[in-house]
Each structure stands twice: as structure tokens, then as C-alpha cells.
Image (cartoon, rainbow, N blue to C red):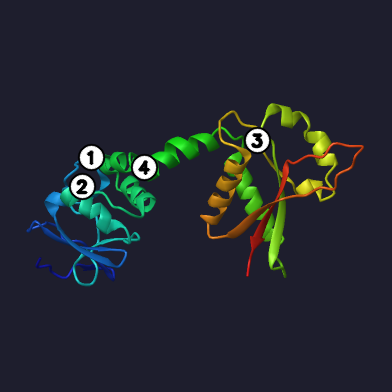
Amino acid sequence: MSLPDYKSHGKQSAPAILHTPVVQLNVGGHLFSTTLGQLRKHPESKLAELFTGQPKLRADAQGRFFIDRDGSHFGAVLEFLRSDRLPTENIQQVHKEAVYYNIKPLIKRLEETPQMFGELVGRQQFLSRVPHYKENIEVLIRIARAEAIAARHSTIMICILRTEEDLGFYDNAINSLEADKESVVTFGPWKAVPSVKDLLDCIKMDIESQGYTVSVEPHITQRNILSRSYDYFYKLIFTWW
């Protein structure tokens, strides 16, 4: 594609008119060659919109259309446009790109894969039934970071109340705890099949997905023959180094 010098105020402008169906792309430093037909394959998509009418993108120094976004998974998007073939790995990351570019057929196909179906229909639907789940995850991370100063580990106590009956024992349970009661983060109760272990797995998974290293251990309380013991408490341990 023959391009004139499109400098304007020190920046490269995109070609005003596309004279050839072959397009050179620079997506966050990843280089691709494709055709206008592929980019416009789904007219309602953001990708088609970018290459319809007057181009809405600037060019890089070599005249390639530049999309200022991580292009690590753009190849999988392009492959779907070319062949309708779905990726076999990094499904969630490609789904994120499909949503960004609003390529609805790709979004739908990815959400029907076992990986996405299980996440969206199974796990996320379960977590939506756990009160304040996302907020509690943020609180856990915030407390852990506050306690990380000059320490290798941060340990946060969490309380898991599976049922309404468990909730009824909450005051007694929290009063039996020798640890700092103010920093205990409580999850539940919920009306869904998954167990306490399932919820603990989700908590660990969602914190580790943000780059943290965590482990979960049951908090063992000293048993007193005169009072009831409660198994609602777990230690969430962040390891910093």
C-alpha cells in the first residue's frame, strides 16, 4: 500500500482513502496482514466500523494502521474472521478481545465452549448468589496489602456461613474467636448447591487471577467441653516473597 507522508503535528495520520483490499496492521506492536473484507466481515462490529468510510486510525511510522491495544490475542480474532476457527487456548483472553471489538458471532461461539460455559453458567452464577462476593474479595486484598509491611506473609481470617442456620450462630462463633474480630471477612450464606470448599476454591482462584500467591487453611480453635466449637473460620495466607 503506497502511502504519502501523513505527518500532522508530529503524528502519523491514517490514509484518507483505502486503495487496496490488503491492509497492514500494527496492533500494540504485533504486526498483521489481512484484507478489508475480513475486517468488515461483521458490519455491526467495532472492527468493521474502524475500517468503513474515512479511516479512524492513525498510521505508524511504516504506514501500517495502528490500534493502540495489546495485540497478543488479535491473531486468534483474525483467524476466526478468516476461517470461523475458534482458538484452543486463552479462551477468556480472546473473549475479552471479541467483546472489545464487538464481534458478536465470536462472542457467542466462545461463550458456548466448555471453558466459558462452565465459568459463565456455573461458577459466575453461583458467585452471584453469594452476598457481596466481589466486594469481599477487594476487602481481602486491601487488608492483606496493608499487613504486608516488613512481612513475608499476610494472614486474614475469613468466616464462611453456608446456611441461614449458620448465620444464626454467627455472634456466638465470632465471640469465640481469639483472633482480631474486626478484620474477619464474612461470606454467605447462599442458596445454591456448591459447598464451602467450592467457595474457598473460588476465593483462591479469583485472588490468584490478580497475580497474588495465596493458600487457605482451616482455623483450628481450641475445643472447650463446656462450649460449642465452630468450623466456620479459615485462614487466607498471602505470600509476598
Q: Position of residue 80 (x, y in %)?
A: 22, 50
Circle 1 is placed at which residue position? 44
- Nearer the observer, disc 4 or disc 2? 4
Badge 3 vs badge 1, beta-carbon distance below 8 Å = no
The amino acid marked with disc number 3 is: Gly
Label 1 and label 4: CA atoms lie apart by: 27 Å
Q: Which of the image's four quarters has the N terminus? A: bottom left
Q: In this view, does 68 lie to the left or right of 206?
A: left
Q: In this view, does 119 lie to the left or right of 65?
A: right
Badge 2 vs badge 1, beta-carbon distance below 8 Å = yes
Label 3 and label 1: CA atoms lie apart by: 41 Å
Structural crowding at the residue carrying mark 4, measured as other residues with C-alpha within 10 Å and reported as few (<14), some (14–19) or many (≥20): few
Structural crowding at the residue carrying mark 3, measured as other residues with C-alpha within 10 Å and reported as few (<14), some (14–19) or many (≥20): many
Q: How many marks?
A: 4
Label 2 and label 1: CA atoms lie apart by: 7 Å
Residue found at x 35% / y 61%: 70
Residue found at x 36% / y 55%: 90
Label 3 and label 4: CA atoms lie apart by: 27 Å
Q: Where is residue 48 in the image (x, y as percent from the top left)?
A: 20, 47
- What SS does tag 2 mark? helix
- Nearer the observer, disc 3 or disc 1? 3
Quadrant of residue 240 within the rendered picture:
bottom right
- What SS does tag 1 mark? loop
Q: Where is residue 31 in the image (x, y as percent from the top left)?
A: 23, 66
The amino acid marked with disc number 4 is: Pro
Q: Residue 94 or 201: which is nearer the viewer? A: 201
Label 2 and label 3: CA atoms lie apart by: 45 Å
Residue found at x 43% / y 39%: 120
Residue 114: numbered disc = 4
Circle 3 is placed at which residue position? 188
Q: Is residue 19 depicted above or below 127 in this figure?
A: below
Circle 2 is placed at which residue position? 48
